[in-house]
Amino acid sequence: MRTLRERQGSLKWILPVFILILLACAASPGNTVKSEKTVIVLSMDGMRWDYPRRDHLEAFARMAEKGLKAGRMTPPFPSLTFPSHSTIATGCYPNKHGIVANSFLDVKKHKRFTQSGSTASDLREPPLWVIAEKAGIRSAVAAWPCSKGEWRGTSPTFFRPFGAPGWDTGTLRWILDQLKKPSSRRPGLIMAWTSGADHPGHLQGPDGAKVIEAERRADHLLAGLEKGIEALPAGEKVDLIVLSDHGMAAVNRVVDVVSLIPKHAFFPYIAVSGPICNIYAKNPAQRDAVARALKRLPPDVKVYEKGSLPPELHYLNDARTGDFVIICPLGSTFLGYPGRSGRRKAPPKGMHGYLPEIGEMGGIFYAEGPDFRVGSRPKEVRAVDVAPTVCKILGIQPPPEMDGTALKSLR
Ligand SMILES: [Zn+2]
C-alpha cells in the first residue's frame, strides 16, 4: 500500500498535466469553430444580372421574395471565369490571388497557366474551403475553378471534380447528399460551380435562344435545390447564396493581335483570354519590338505597359501580369491562335472579360437563409465581398489580406 504522502506526490502531477491537455485542445486546430449551420455558394456561370427578370425565371423570383437580391454582382477585372471565381473564393483581387486571366504565364516559375491544368496551388491566397478547414469546419467543393488538389497541405473534406458524371444535375444530387449527412459529418461550407448560361452566351450572344434554354435549366436546378433543402430536417440552418462570375455582351468585331507580333520562339509569349491579352517579353529589345508592333492596333484598343496599369484595376502581379496588358473595348474581342489544322475557331457572338463597371458585365447575386434579411436589396455585391460574408456567417476571422468586407444586410 502506498502512503498518503506518496499519493499526494503523484496527485501533484495530475493538475499540471490536465492543464497542458486543456491548452493543447484549445490550440489545435487554431480557432476551431463549432457551427451547426451550412453555407452553400452556388455559382451559375455567365448568368447576367438581368436574365432572371428578363426571362421570367420563377425559382429566382421566389428566392428574391424570400431573401436578398442584389442589383448586380460586380466581378473583378478581368471579368473572366477563372479570375472571378478565384476572387469569390479568396476575397482578393487578381493582383493578390494571382489568377490574372484564363490563360497566362508565371515568369518566375516559367509555368503556363491553363484552365484544364489549373489546381488550388495556383492560388496565391487561401480559398474559403481552406480557411474553413483550418478553422475546423468541413468543406465540400464541386467543380470550382482552381479547387483541385491541396492548397499548402489542405484540401476540402469532400470533393467532386469538374466534368464528373451527370454534370449539373449530378452536382445538385451531390449537394443534397452532403446536406443529408449526420451533423457529425455534414460540411459547414459547400461551394459548387454549374454551367449556367455561359457556353450558349458565347455561341449565340446574350439574346440567343439557347441562352434562354440554359437559363431555364438553371432555374429548374435552383427549384430542385430549394425543394431538397426544405425537405431536410436541418434545412432551416442552411444559408444559400446563388451567384455568377460575370455577365455577357454581344460581340461584333475581332482584333487579331497574334499575327501582329513578330514571333519565332516561345517569347514573346502572347496569352489571349477573350478581350484581354497579356504579352511577356524576354528582354528589353523584344519589349521594344512588341511596343512598336502594338502601335498598329486599332486606336480604341487600350495598351498598358506593366508599370502604367491603373491601380483601380488591381491587376499588377509581379510574376504573372504581362509586360503589356491589352484590353478590347466592349463589343470587340481578340482572335486566338490558329488550331492544329491552321484554322481559327469561328469568332464568338458573346464575350465577357471587359471592365467590371460595364453594365453587361454584372452577374447575379441572390441569398436566402437564417443569416440574410428578407427583402434586402443592395445595389451591388462585389465579388471580393463574398468570402468575408461567408467567414462572418461561419464565425471565422477572415484573413487580413482580403480586399472585401462582409455584407451589411446580414442578420
Ligand atoms: Zn464564367
Image (spheres, helix red, strand yellow):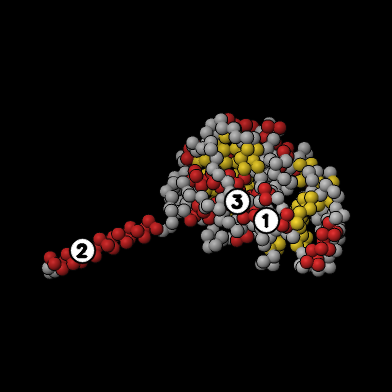
The CA distance from mark 3 to mark 1 is 13 Å
Given residues 342 and 185, the one toward you in this image is 342
Secondary element type, mark 1: loop
Task: Give me the disc on residue 11.
Answer: 2
Q: Quadrant of residue 19?
A: bottom left
The CA distance from mark 3 to mark 2 is 53 Å
Left or right for 343, reference 61? right
User: As shown in the figure, which amino acid type bears the numbered disc 2?
Assistant: Leu
Which residue corresponds to the image point at 57% horizontal and 34% vertical from the top-left?
68
Q: Earlier in the sequence, mark 3 or mark 1?
A: 3
Callout 3–callout 2 Cβ contact below 8 Å: no
User: As shown in the figure, which amino acid type bears the numbered disc 1?
Assistant: Leu
Front: mark 3 or 2: 3
User: As shown in the figure, which amino acid type bears the numbered disc 3?
Assistant: Cys
The answer to whether mark 1 is within 8 Å of ligand 1 is no
The residue carrying mark 3 is 92
